[in-house]
Amino acid sequence: MCYLIQDAENGTLLALKLGFSHLDSAPIYENEASVGKAISSSGVPRERLYVTTKYDGGDIEAELRKSLADLGLDYVDLYLHHHPKLSEGGDHAKAWKEFEKVQEKGLAKSIGVSNFGVADMEAIFASKPKILPAVNQIRLHPYNYAESKPLLDLCASHNIVIEAFRILYPLTRAPGGAVDVVIEKVAQRIGGTPAQVLFKWALARRVVVVTTSENEDRLVQYLNTFSLADLTSEEIDEIDAAGAKGSPPESNLGPVATEQVAAIAARLGIQRF
Ligand SMILES: NC(=O)c1ccc[n+]([C@@H]2O[C@H](COP(=O)([O-])OP(=O)(O)OC[C@H]3O[C@@H](n4cnc5c(N)ncnc54)[C@H](OP(=O)(O)O)[C@@H]3O)[C@@H](O)[C@H]2O)c1
């Protein structure tokens, strides 16, 4: 469960109460302090949580220490390099060495990357790292699955876990495409919702889903996904084939980017995080 909003305290508390344990934050979302407040007031023991935060530029160890102070934690379970454009001078090997140091110091149990493409991953591998990225957190949904396949295969060949955001893209941002008809049909067969079918599609690919909602019914629905029947290989192929037909235009840009997020995205030369 993760929140691209500044005050995530209530949403995080609700998610923890319902049984979520994986929290994903980032300084660029300005939500670490509120996630930290929710953690401390929830009463959930630290060791039952899996807390991720991300590197958004600057000195890597100093930035992680700042994040830990905001979260009120001694360590994070996963520290992610948020975007390849944040490596100073484009030098991923140098940045990754700093990531290895923060893991060795115990500030992060695991380290990983986000939004890294094939060439970015190859640059890390070529540097003969002591520690491989544990995770690559990327945008993934049926409409970009085919183009993402080489990256998924490369990560799989190095045992790097894929975490996916934007899984709900066909529902939340680009409704009306070929995928909708298929996920609606599969939802009826398994007695679930189209969102649960998209989660099942991701789980069938051994992908960790990173999503967000402040709506209690949806949060419960997400947790219940695991008890639904798995998709058949024919259904997975049908979703892939529908995705390969191409996405309709994005009609909903999703949670409003804060001015800070928009400014940093502009500095990096990307549309938005
Ligand atoms: N690593 C990165 O670069 C990166 C980039 C983007 C996002 N992320 C992370 O991934 C998280 C998820 O982002 P996302 O882009 O994947 O969000 P998303 O799931 O596309 O959108 C979430 C929004 O959609 C609504 N929603 C949830 N379920 C829905 C459903 N079944 N039908 C209709 N609307 C629904 C939610 O509203 P309600 O609250 O009303 O349910 C929420 O505002 C973010 O919070 C962020 O932390 C990471």
Image: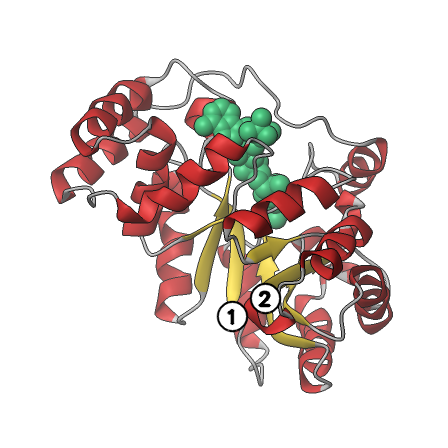
Within 10 Å of disc 2 (Cα), the crowding (few <14, some 14-19, many 20+) is many
Residue 58 visible (yes or no): yes
| Residue at the image position 55 percent from the left and 68 percent from the top | 48
**163 or 14: nearer the eye?**
14
Q: Is residue 219 left or right of residue 74?
A: left
Q: Which residue is mark 2?
A: 112
Separation (CA) of disc 2 from disc 1: 5 Å
Label of residue 169 in the image? none
Q: Amino acid at mark 2?
A: Gly
**Residue 54 picture location, percent across and down:** 70, 58
The circle drawn on residue 134 is: 1
Q: Secondary structure at mark 1?
A: loop
Is residue 28 or residue 18 the one in the foreground? 18
Residue 1 showing in the rendered view: no
Asked if the beta carbon under badge 1 is closer than 8 A to the nearest atom of ligand 1, the reply is no
Label 2–label 1 contact, CB within 8 A = yes
**Ligand 1 shown in quarter:** top right
Answer above or below: position of 109 versus 273: below
Amino acid type assigned to the residue bearing label 1 in the image: Ala
Q: Nearer the viewer, residue 147 or 112?
A: 112
Above/below status of 248 relative to 210: above
